[in-house]
Image (cartoon, helix red, strand yellow):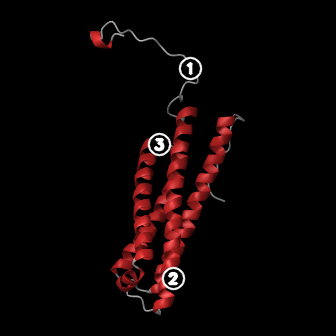
Amino acid sequence: MGLSIKPSSPSPVTETHYHTHKVFLLCNYILLGAASSCIFLTISLRLVPSICGFFLILLHIWTIGGAIFGCHAATAGTSRCYAIHMVATVLTAIFQGSVSVLVFTRTGDFLESLKSYVREEDAAMILKLSGGLCILIFCLEWVVLALAFVLRYYAYVEGDGNNSGMRRSSKVQQEDMSDWPWPFQV
């Protein structure tokens, strides 16, 4: 089920990397489920959504795309994929947080802009369920962001295919400072 990595050696860093990657994938799977549930809840308010509903569904599609791309970026390990994933995750988290604030503070106005044909009390409950999922998505996006950073750090320390990784010695090399200006020659 899903992507997996197998540690090649039983070193503690690799084992930690393995477990962090599993948690990262689990968070992305939860994001996929929550975003698709939000889409279905929005569609249940009105089958053919208004422009506001369309943008809400588009935000959840963006969230799904970001979660799928996050799974790819975690296995690809390139700097470009990592940077794109970070930017998309931050933007998605900001928009999901904004939507959840709108849902809980201005429920009636939000329902009017959605042009729901469901009874108002039921529509408010459906919208608040969707807002609760938006809060979950907001929190999970920041968790995914932190886990992606940790995974990228482990890739740097262990070394991916392109470089040899960080040296594990604590030896500091002395630099020749004779050609530096006087104030810096301490």
Residue picked out by circle 1: 170
Q: Residue furthest front?
A: 105
Image coords of residue 47 (percent x, y):
44, 86
Instruction: Identify which residue is drawn at 34% across, 10% down.
Output: 185
Image coords of residue 70 (percent x, y):
50, 54
Residue kind at label 3, given as amino acid type = Thr
| Label 3 CA crowd tier, 10 Å (few <14, some 14–19, many 20+) | some
> Given this view, does label 3 or label 1 mark the residue nearer the observer?
1
Q: Residue furthest left?
A: 181
Residue kind at label 1, given as amino acid type = Ser
| Label 2 CA crowd tier, 10 Å (few <14, some 14–19, many 20+) | some
Residue kind at label 2, given as amino acid type = Ile
Instruction: Identify which residue is drawn at 42% across, 47% down.
Output: 83
Q: Quadrant of residue 9?
A: top right
Residue picked out by circle 2: 126
Label 1 element class: loop
Q: Would you say residue 26 is visible in this rendering? A: yes
* Residue 181 vertical position relative to residue 41 in the rendered view, above or below: above
Instruction: Identify which residue is drawn at 53% across, 59% down.
Output: 140
Label 2 element class: helix
**Residue 78: which disc?**
3
